[in-house]
Image (cartoon, rainbow, N blue to C red):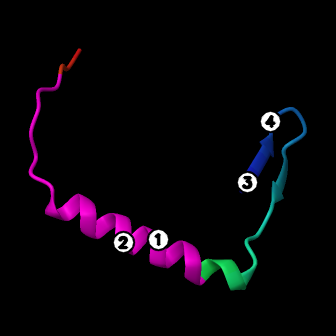
Amino acid sequence: MVVYFPATGKVQVKRLRSLHNNTIAEEENRYLKTVENKAVCGDIELF
């Protein structure tokens, strides 16, 4: 997570622990597979 304070120009970064990085990557890969298998359908409105 990155937090930026425009008034001071200060930036803070909260890093994920490496233990959780594998879990997050696995969840993202699982989600990607479900999205890839779904047919694209529906309408969109551009404005």
Front position among marks 2 and 4: 2
Quarter location, residue 7:
top right
Q: Residue at x 73, y 54 (%)?
A: 2
Q: CA distance from mark 3 to mark 1?
A: 21 Å
Q: Which corner quadrant holds the C terminus?
A: top left
**Residue 44 percent across, percent down from the top left:** 16, 26
Q: Are discs 2 and 3 less than 8 Å apart at CB?
A: no
Q: Residue at x 47, y 71 (%)?
A: 27
**Residue under numbered circle 1:** 27
Which of the two labelled residues, at mark 2 and mark 4, occupies the earlier sequence position? 4
Q: Are discs 2 and 1 less than 8 Å apart at CB?
A: yes
Residue placed most toward the observer, 12 or 10: 12
Mark 3 surroundings within 10 Å by alpha-carbon count, few (fewer than 14), some (14 through 19), many (20 or more): few
On whether residue 41 falls in the magenta region, the answer is yes
Q: Is 34 drawn above or below residue 7 in the view shown?
A: below
Q: CA distance from mark 3 to mark 4?
A: 13 Å
